[in-house]
Structure formats: C-alpha cells, structure tokens
Image (spheres, grey):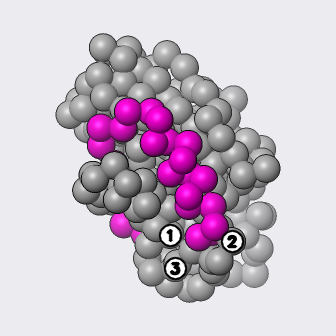
C-alpha cells in the first residue's frame, strides 16, 4: 500500500521570541489559499500539524475546506536550536549540521531532533497506511526528516527552501520510495 506524506513548511511568519504563538505575516496569509488549492486535489485523508501557530495557520484553510480536523503532533515542532551566545543564527546552523551530535545549551542536536521527527512520522505511517497525509511543519525539522531517507539533503537544501514549501514523501508498505517537490513559493 502506498502512503503519501505531504510535508508543508509553514508560510512566511512574523518573527517574535514566542515560538509557539508566532503567527503568519500578511504575505504568509496570502499564500494559504495557494497551499489549499494545490493540496485539495490530492485526496487528503488526514491533516496533522506541529503545535506552532504558523504551521497550523498554513494548513487550517485546507482542513476547513475538506472538513478535516487538524491533529496536533508535538514531534513535528521545529527543532530547538538552544541558547546562542555571541553566534549568529546561520553560524549556529552550520555547527549543528557539521556535527550531528552537537547541541547548544538547551537545544537539540540534529540527531535528537531527527529522532523525534522520525518517531512521529513512523507513528503516522503505521496508523495511516495507504492514506494521503498533510503535515504542517517547519524547515529545519522537515529537512532533518528528509535527511533520514537521503543523507545528501542537509543545510544547503534547507537554505533553498521557501515559505511555504511542499514535498511529498512516498512510502510503499512503510518503506521510503521517493521524494517529490510538489510546490514552492517562487
């Protein structure tokens, strides 16, 4: 049985320190209907999201349109980079992608965040075999999940992602078979 997972990186959001409650920006809200229009034709059976507001907002119009509830799954939340002192964001990302077991104080290493994402994904695959599932998520955790199946996917891949961006991961009897770029905000 073929299962399709549609990983949806959230649309553009307003930056704030509040990771959980950070909303979409006006530009992000404008992209929501495009996400809905694209995914509505993929016979979606289930919609799941990170608990973060921006991920939920990106897919909630789709959920309303096809009359599906959004299930919140903690495992798809963004990776916690941690406390960064005297280092900028990009430099911090280079460090964690160079050494997958490295983490900043109060942060997650690539290995820990990836394990969390893969455990969540495997639960979804086991519970919804043969279905089409949309998962609203974030750039770093999305790339870490994809990296698990293809180790050529990494920081450079993350750098080219847009907000939003959508990738389909296809599985046959829970075995990964392919990754397809569905749409990007070019």
Task: Please give the residue where the numbered disc 1 appears in the rendered image.
Answer: 54
Q: Which mark is residue 27?
A: 2
State the SS at label 2. helix
Look at the image and give the residue range highlighted in magenta. 28-52
For residue 25, which quarter of the picture?
Answer: bottom right
Point out residue 18 in the picture as x, y percentages from the top left corner: 50, 84
* Circle nearer the N terminus (3, 1): 3
- Do the CB atoms of the residues marked 2 and 3 lie less than 8 Å apart? no
Residue at disc 1, secondary structure: helix
Q: Residue at coordinates 42% horizontally, 48% vertically from top-left?
A: 135
Front in this rendered view, residue 148 or 95: 148
Q: Nearer the viewer, mark 2 or mark 3?
A: 2
Distance (Cα) linking label 2 and label 3 = 14 Å
Q: Are marks 1 and 2 in contact (CB under 8 Å)?
A: no
Q: In the figure, 45 relative to 97: above or below?
A: above
Q: Secondary structure at mark 3?
A: loop
Pointer 1: residues within 10 angstroms few (<14), some, or many (20+)?
many
Q: CA distance from mark 1 to mark 2?
A: 12 Å
Q: Nearer the viewer, mark 1 or mark 2?
A: 2
In this rendering, is residue 85 above or below 36?
below
Bin the neighbour count of mark 2 within 10 Å (Cα to Cα): few under 14, some 14-19, many 20 and up.
few
The reply, left or right, for residue 183 in relation to residue 113 is: right
Residue 70 can be seen in this image: yes
**Camera sees residue 112:** no
Q: Main secondary structure of the magenta part?
A: helix
Closer to us: 120 or 69: 69
Q: Quadrant of residue 21?
A: bottom left
Q: Magenta span has 47?
A: yes
Residue that numbered label 3 is attached to = 22
Q: Residue 9's x, y, as percent?
A: 56, 53
Percent x, y of residue 123: 26, 38
């Amino acid at each position: 049985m073929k299962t399709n997972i549609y990983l949806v990186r959230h649309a553009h959001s307003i930056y704030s320190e509040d990771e959980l409650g950070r909303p979409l920006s006006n530009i992000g809200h404008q992209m929501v209907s495009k996400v809905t229009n694209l995914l509505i034709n993929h016979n979606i059976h289930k919609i799941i999201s990170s608990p973060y507001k921006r991920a939920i907002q990106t897919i909630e119009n789709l959920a309303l349109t096809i009359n599906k509830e959004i299930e919140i799954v903690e495992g798809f939340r963004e990776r916690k980079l941690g406390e960064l002192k005297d280092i900028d964001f990009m430099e911090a990302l280079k460090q964690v992608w160079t050494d997958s077991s490295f983490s900043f104080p109060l942060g997650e290493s690539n290995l820990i965040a990836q394990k969390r994402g893969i455990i969540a994904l495997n639960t979804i695959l086991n519970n919804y075999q043969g279905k089409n599932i949309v998962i609203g998520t974030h750039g770093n955790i999305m790339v870490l999940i994809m990296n698990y199946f293809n180790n050529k996917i990494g920081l450079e891949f993350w750098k080219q992602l847009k907000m939003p961006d959508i990738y389909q991961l296809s599985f046959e009897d829970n075995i990964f078979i392919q990754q397809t770029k569905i749409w990007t905000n070019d």
